[in-house]
Amino acid sequence: MADEKKPTKNLWGELPTAEAFKTPKVVLQEQADILYESTGGRLQGRIDTNTMAKNIVHEFFVVAPFVNHYSVNILDVYHDALAYPVKVKNNMTTVRGLIDLASSEYTCNNVEELEKTLADVLQSKAVRNVIMSLLAQSQ
């Protein structure tokens, strides 16, 4: 009788799927796509993802392709291996020295809290001024 190899036993069980789970990077990419569509391609959103210590870091930039790809880092999103909670660091807390938003760092426990925080930052005076200026220079 030939040696019969036993099948490898799956110790993982059935692994979960991520189909219905919206990660922070997906939320940021959706906003990058909306920025591109809303400005007719005159502005783009770019997400650079890196690791720092035990965190995954997503840096969100507004890019002006018609101004030699000038970019502004609007915010950063940090999380560990678990996608939530996340920390959002607003890099646009001041408008020419005047306080725009009350805080520069937020904790979001789920996608709904992340979307609300992103809306607050993206609709802030500081970000609006950057968008307006870059659009004017992108003609």
Image: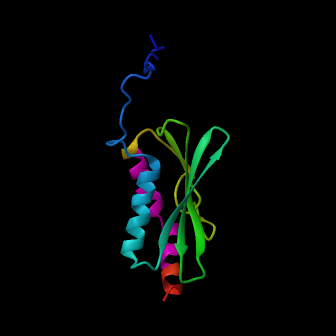
**Residue most extreme to the bottom:** 139
Say how the picture is coloured: rainbow
Quick one: 62 or 123, which is closer to the camera? Answer: 62
Residue 112 location, quadrant: top left
Residue 131 in picture, x, y percent from top left: 49, 74
Residue 68 in picture, x, y percent from top left: 60, 81
Residue drawn at x 37%, y 74% as measured from the top left: 38
Q: How many marks?
A: 0
Residue drawn at x 62%, y 71% as measured from the top left: 96
Residue drawn at x 46%, y 38% as measured from the top left: 84
**Residue most extreme to the right:** 53
**Residue most extreme to the top:** 1
Residue 71 in picture, x, y percent from top left: 59, 71
Quick one: 73 or 106, which is closer to the camera? Answer: 73
Q: Is residue 129 magenta?
A: yes
Q: Is residue 17 above or below residue 46?
A: above
Q: Does the magenta stretch include residue 28?
A: no
Residue 73 in picture, x, y percent from top left: 59, 63
Residue numbers of the magenta segment: 113-132
